[in-house]
Image (cartoon, rainbow, N blue to C red):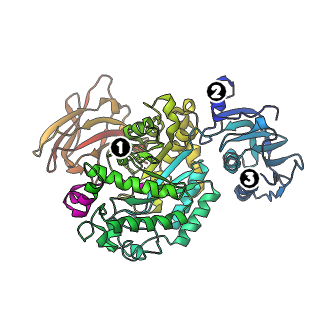
Amino acid sequence: MKTKPLATTAALLVALGALSAKAVTTALCPEPALITEKPGAFEIGKATLIEYAPQVPGAEEAARFLAECWRVPTGLPLPVQAGDKPQKAGAVRFAAPAAADEKQPSEGYWLCVSPAGISVVASDAAGQFYGAQTLRQLVTPADLLRVPCLEIRDAPRFGWRGLMLDESRHFMGKAAVLKILDGMASLKLNRFHWHLTDSPGWRLEIKRFPELTTVGAIGDHSDPKRPAQFYTQDDVREILAYARARHILVIPEIELPAHSTAAMRAFPNLSCTGKPEFMYCAGNDEVIRFLEQVLDEVCTLFDSPFIHVGGDECPKDVWKKCPKCQARKAANGLKDEHELQSWMIRHFDQYLAKKGRRLIGWDEILEGGLAPGAAVMSWRGVKGGQAAAAMGHDVVMSPTSFLYLDYPQAAASDGYSYFAVRINSCERILSFNPCEGIPADKQKHILGLQGNLWAETCYNGKEAEWKLFPRAAAIADRSWSPAAKVSWASFETRAPEICARLKAMGLHVAPYGEPAWYKPVAAWKTGEQSEAWASRDWNISAAFKEAGPYKVRFIYTRGKHQLQFRNVTLLENGTEIAKDARQGSAGANPKSFDYTFTMPAAAKPGAVYTLRAEIRSDGGNDSSGTICVFPENLDK
């Protein structure tokens, strides 16, 4: 190892522009900061030993993790042993920097592969683990016994690289969470935001208040009478230990003051009206003490420095009519209910600070004044994050417009339900710049970014995997890799192998892009149709080349109403060549409808091919969609 590793992430990025390296053929994800391929390969064999330097944080754990990952596919023994110095040639060694100038950045690692051996150098346990994860990716199913020679110097761009899972609306269960954590770790994602309480159900055992789970855990978004589903504190400890071993920090979310109906089903006295409401009574001292006692147990159970308190979507009408809320407002000189909410957030910011924790909440906590120590999770676009950073507050970017994973991942239907607001594809995620619009001196407050999977339309762990992966890989690239190295072109090249690795882990993985048949040639838009049948023409000449059967697929994308169609006709230069009189529809269900036409001969040069149909909307004209025309053999 003749080259000295770089000491800081900034130095890595500077060197990126100066280093001349071969094009990388390995499909690593996230893409390393610096990588140089070299001739040859390290051969894994029966004599291969995996060594670790004792007393080096995380080295033994990383060595044993790598051995476990390699033993199954290779069938080799791969013994693991400690050693102050390299014991033999042909070994894989995990060690600390040998000199001060070899010190690695936080979570960073220096990996060297030569025919004589492999070394991973890191200054912390996370770096050791991430070096092992990279080695795991370098061994491919096509060549299980060879690791290509290369040098990697790597460290993350952001410290917060996260996913959020909502288990209040639909409970996924421990096995599902553990699988998701494994997928995250393989991509070097390190923050798991766990949405455990909301109006549909309270999912965390609080021993002081057992009614929160005996009553509050009953029901979910689909069935208000579903038997109670929740995590015991022993379950949580097991999940936290599993996450900790994979260098993932688990951030619990305990919603307040709103999204709290489940808690008030158990304790209606905590509302303004004495019956379950959406928000707690902000003027009731019992509420404050109740939430303090809940947070006491949460802080004992979870080791995260951040505790998420929600703080979003709190209507104020009930507070305006509540004598206790109005008394609290008057006693504290608060001018409106926004400041009353801010008072409540500030109280818990101070309460958590006394316990050595930091409050983080959705960007509504900016309204009425931001608590001094609070961090902001910017979800309603990026303006909340920009404002918080300008005030010197830390920010996690998770805007709906790029990082909401309950939005569709492709324009083509995949058989699952989503909020059809916009398409948050891998390509779109990679286009997001979390620091855009933030002055250079304030960018230090951008902790990172996070994809959020809300569960109104996500019903179980298998579906959660589909909606998380491979979009989680795009989030990993955007949050770990240097900005200059992140692009759709790079990701698309690596995506087949990335998806194959995730599938090999047993994850249910969605396609990384649109299917081959998805070739939109026409569309309909809101306001273009009425409730009366009317004829509509679309020029679809670009769709046809060869003779043979073609499918015409009407695909609903958004809107309150469905589009109905009948007497669908294919015209060549105005002359009918095929027709299907069947009536079909595309809307929320079903989302698409197909017609099949046969081109009797290859498309004529210069000919105009027109799709004509009688159409109408169902109950209103708020409907949008696309029309795809493609050879039938592409519909796999």
Q: Name the residue type under label 1.
A: Arg
Residue situated in front as seen by the camera: 339 or 151: 339
Question: Label 3: which residue?
Answer: 57
- Based on the displayed image, in which of its 4 quarters is residue 625 positioned? top left
Q: Residue at x 35, y 73 (%)?
A: 226
- Give, as a three-letter code, the residue at label 3: Pro
In this view of the protein, can residue 417 be seen by the observer? no
Give 172 or 286, whichever is nearer the viewer: 286
Q: Are marks 2 and 3 in contact (CB under 8 Å)?
A: no
User: Which label sits on residue 90?
Assistant: none
Instruction: Measuring from the top left, give residue 353's x and y in whole percent.
Output: 50, 54
Neighbourhood count class around disc 2 (C-alpha, 10 Å): few under 14, some 14–19, many 20 upward = few
Instruction: Name the amino acid, label 2.
Output: Val
User: Magenta region: which residues?
Assistant: 309-327
Q: Which mark is residue 14?
A: 2
Does residue 41 show up magenta in the picture? no
Decide if residue 303 is on the left or right side of residue 329: right
Looking at the image, residue 524 sits to the left or right of residue 184; the answer is: left
| Whole-number angstrom distance, CA of label 1 to CA of label 3 | 40 Å
Q: Which residue is mark 1?
A: 380
